[in-house]
Image: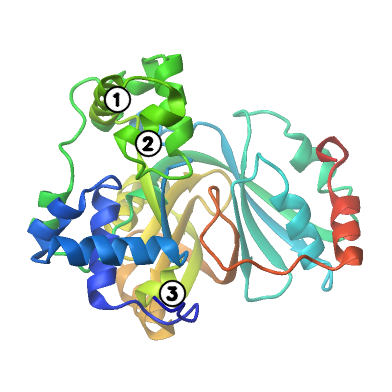
Amino acid sequence: MARATADSALSLIDQRLVAALQCDGRLTAERAAQVLGLNPATVRRRLHALGADGTLRVVVSPVARPRNGGSAGALFLRIRVLRGKLDTIVAALAAREDIPFIDITTSGDEIFAVARTEPGSRDPLVFRQLPSTQAVTSLESATILHVFRLTSEWRHQVLTAAERAALSPAGPGPGSAADGSPGPYGVDTDAVEQALIDALTPDARLSSAALAERTGHPESTVRRRLARLADQGRLVTQVLVDPRRLGLLIEAKLLLHVAPDHLAAAGQALADHPAVHGAFATSGPSNLHAAAYFPDLTALYGFLSRDLVGLGITHVETAVVSRAAKRTPALPRPVQPAPPVRAAREARQARPARQR
């Protein structure tokens, strides 16, 4: 399969296979073929091609939804930098393990990032390291208070509701995160389960036989533990694919001011919208943050002018993303040439001391 350009859309068959994997990252080719009306050999061939050329990866999601939608401890950062220093600051932030997501907007001097932190703490990055960096001209920080929608829960809208239902595994049972009762977050992950999760994190489609070989546990044990993890909602997979390959050329960040008595309803309405892949209640004047994919700017305008009406939103600020600089695990993308020595040196110098 020849590599397509970054903004060329996949065929409808390939897009439907991507959407099928969003329903179940460990879906078999035979089950996908049965539900989608395809030949199993065709499904196996297309899935192999999509993975082999770097178009997609299926991974264990780096972020799990906390029980009852609460936040496990994360900050939204909005960073403005001196023009000409954007790449240096992005490289320094991307080197940090506590920053899983970085987006660059079309303004040319603005970075949106997510930083993991202890709730309510004086995070050194926010209180000391970024403010002391001369290339940073302004910094806004907002604590995530409630999760309405995570990217791992977003579904590409090319399947029917019946197809999605048939492809999705049975939901977690009582005592799981899905029903809001104490479940996975009160269950200790033992050494066997942790070994399986670690092996699946970069490639969630590894077979039970391959996992048994990598972890040294019997295949029967691997199958049983995988079923347990899935039943308890502790094995959440995510399909990493450039949204432009799905025909979604525009990604927008939305910072919304919502009256308190409308916050929960507005957040849920955004989470239910097919374009929205992230929705969070936050601290700060913009108390609702969202991220969404659109095929073009006309669709974005329609979303702003029609779909947000009646939600109690009093102010909207929209930022269009020019590049997703970091996703953890990383988005599939072609291998890039090594940066020039000078740029690499500047990135090291801009990195906070504890990260050097």
Q: Position of residue 204 (x, y in %)?
A: 38, 43
Q: Which of marks 1 and 3 is nearer the N terminus?
A: 1
Residue 330 in percent (x, y) is at 55, 53
Q: In terms of depth relative to the viewer, which is nearer, 191 or 42? A: 42
| Cβ atoms at labels 1 and 3 below 8 Å apart | no
Q: Check disc 2 and report the residue beneath it.
A: 210
For image coordinates 73% across by 31% down, the residue present is 122
Examine the rendering and report whether any part of residue 12 can be seen. yes
Instruction: Name which residue type carries label 3.
Output: Arg
Residue denoted by label 1:
219
Whichever of labels 2 and 3 marks the residue nearer the N terminus, that label is 2
**Which image quarter: residue 294?**
bottom left
Q: Taking 137 as reference, is 173 above or below it? A: above
Q: Position of residue 281 (x, y in %)?
A: 46, 45
Residue at figure coordinates x 30%, y 33% from the top left: 208
In the image, which is nearer the foreground, mark 1 or mark 3?
A: 1
For marks 2 and 1, the one nearer the N-term is 2
Question: Dot 2: few (<14), some (14–19), or many (≥20) neighbours within 10 Å?
Answer: some
Closest to the observer, 57 or 347 = 57
